Image: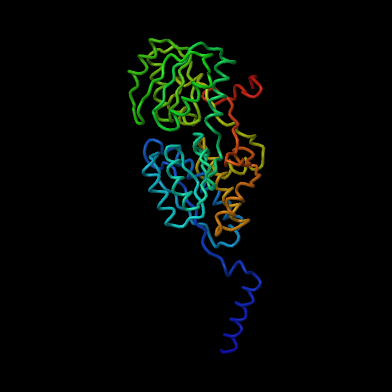
Amino acid sequence: MKSLRVLLIMMVVCGLAAYPGLAAAKTLKIGSMSPLTGQYAADGNDIRQGVETAIAMWEKKGGVPGYDKIKYYPQDSACDGKQAVSSANKLVNLEVAGVIGAYCSSATIPASDVLNDAKIVMLTPASTNEKVTERGFKYMFRVCGRDDDQSKAAAKFLINRLKIKTVAIVDDKTTYTQGLADNLEKALGGKVKVVAREHINQGDKDFSGVLTKIKALDPDVLYMSLYNPEGNLMAIQAKRLGLRATLMSEDAVYHPNYLKIAKEAGEGTYFTFGQPPSKSIPEVKAFLDAYTAKYGEPGSYSSYAYDAANILLSAIAKVGADDPDKLAEAIRATKMQGASKFITFDEKGDSGSTYKVLVVKGGKFVPFWDPETGKDF
């Protein structure tokens, strides 16, 4: 018996010597923040599911070297600054290595104050307000585009392609929607007359007062700088009220739910959104196959969340998670074909914008106009 015990001990010692990572193996903790409940839960759960898809694919190929498993902590930030700060503090206390999130810029900006102070890297897949990466935060990264770029793409389209004379703009007074509306008005540069700047509240369902006022002004375009639930309903009510204006909106209303809810009222609506890469690219196909098999059709920012999680896990695989400075440097050095686009980061932590104009045609989003070339697709 004594000989057998000695043999077992020697086997363990030899095993640890041969595989040093086994001795140091520990659980890798990562978190996310997005609205998992409430009116923006569809987008928030798209983000959660994108992260889960990335983790499942890493685990399928053996996990992250040096870690026995990946523990994922999705938090409900609810598009609310206070709740986002609370979620960020919870993730700090959980000692996560990095955070994917949040969705709304009004949640991402205050949450990033907490995470940056704690030296925890944060990669937002969906917050487009330029202030997210304009504060010089070392640990803040953005996988999606920026609103100062999105607004320029929209302005070019309205001026050069639609050649309109007047526009009415509606926002919901949040950081993202109001910031984008301000940027659009600035980018129009007086070449299109803004006949109305109206505001609604998040969660509103009846827009008859605002739309009646806009109808009387008869703008060529009604630009909806809103989130998805309000945008869906406003499109329906605008058509029902008989507005002549062409509808245009942005990335936060661009979602499969717009097609399902607005239906015929949404036909002909123009959107700005990042150009999706070809489905024939292996990395894109791998994401679509894995995601749709478990969750069905991806939402607007599912692929961006998937890419953000892959960037974080790839960086941890290279440099570990113990040194936040090395981890941030590894993320900043990313050169990766993702499911959303080819991703690199600049000195601010931005990955660039690829905004194109799409139109709803036949119940589908169809690429329509390229701001870079000034030509139709």
Q: Is residue 150 above or below residue 350?
A: above
Quarter assignment of residue 282? top right
- Residue 200 placement (x, y as % from top left): 36, 25
Colour scheme of the rendered structure: rainbow
Quarter assignment of residue 108? top left
- Residue 249 placement (x, y as % from top left): 48, 24
Q: Is residue 309 above or below residue 165?
A: below
Residue under the image location 45 percent in, 18 percent down: 222
Q: Is residue 17 above or below residue 231?
A: below
Q: Residue 158: in sight, yes or no?
A: yes
Q: Nearer the viewer, residue 302 or 329?
A: 329
- Residue 155 placement (x, y as % from top left): 54, 20
Q: Nearer the viewer, residue 235 or 261?
A: 235
Residue under the image location 62 percent in, 78 percent down: 11
Decide if residue 107 is on the left or right side of residue 191.
left
Quadrant that contains the N terminus: bottom right
Quadrant that contains the C terminus: top right
Q: Work out which residue is located at the far front of the displayed protein and give it.
A: 136
Q: Nearer the viewer, residue 369 or 2?
A: 369
Residue under the image location 43 percent in, 45 percent down: 111
